[in-house]
Image (cartoon, helix red, strand yellow):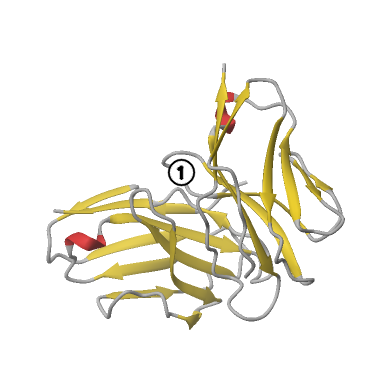
Amino acid sequence: DAKTTQPTSMDCAEGRAANLPCNHSTISGNEYVYWYRQIHSQGPQYIIHGLKNNETNEMASLIITEDRKSSTLILPHATLRDTAVYYCIVRINSGGSNYKLTFGKGTLLTVNP
Amino acid sequence: GAGVSQSPSNKVTEKGKDVELRCDPISGHTALYWYRQSLGQGLEFLIYFQGNSAPDKSGLPSDRFSAERTGGSVSTLTIQRTQQEDSAVYLCASSFSIRDWEYFGPGTRLTVT
């Protein structure tokens, strides 16, 4: 799987949008961008994924650049409960051992009151 | 709806004892995964089930570890003769199919004294 690079930490004010960047310059054409998060002492939680089009769900939006070398996860109105480590990974959706989830260091997002 | 549940939430055991950890996946999910996470560390893949069979047991650390899944539903991870290095949070996840994202349970925190 392609490697990803994320900032170690970020701060955001409650109620404001949180924009979390991720670089994945070696991504392959059949690799998807996935975002997960892990709130302290809880299991990981899937947030969103996409291939090349921007995606939006009830939790977040995912913006993928046209060259697919980077992406941004957007939490439109961050709350204190969004404080967590956010992981960006790239993985294919079929074949091989893509089912093995591997997280890097991730970004610790701290939402401040 | 009900998510992935795990029991017990916490388990303290003496070195050398056997432990059983249980996972109830989301109903209808055919794929089930076990991971463990040591303090401050990333995810360590243990085993993956498709239905009741385990195509990939490559992550099990030693022959003291075993897992089974019955009825395409509940799974049990058994650790025999526990050692202190087995202390970790054991996470179970399930997905509708191997191509879909995972839903994680809250984990079982195992402490071997």
Could you tell whether B59 is left or right of A100 in the image? left
**Amino acid at pointer 1:** Gln
Q: Which residue is mark 1?
A: A42
Q: B20 or A21, which lies in front?
A: A21
Identify which residue is drawn at 22% across, 62% down: B85
Q: A69 or B97, which lies in front?
A: A69
Among the 4 quarters of the image, the one containing residue B80: bottom left
Q: Position of residue A102 (x, y in %)?
A: 52, 63
Q: Dot 1 lies on which element?
A: loop
Could you tell whether B98 is left or right of B91 in the image? right
Q: Position of residue B72 (x, y in %)?
A: 53, 73
Q: Position of residue A7 (x, y in %)?
A: 58, 43
Could you tell whether B31 is left or right of B38 in the image? right
Identify which residue is drawn at 62% across, 81% down: A96
Name the residue at the front extreme.
A25
Identify which residue is drawn at 68% across, 53% down: A23
Q: Position of residue A14 (x, y in %)?
A: 63, 20
* Chain to which mark 1 belongs: A
Q: Is residue B47 above or below residue B88?
A: below
Q: Residues within 10 Å of mark 1 (few under 14, many from 20)?
A: some
Counting every numbered tag in the picture gives 1
Among the 4 quarters of the image, the one containing residue A13: top right
Q: Is residue A98 above or below residue A47?
A: below
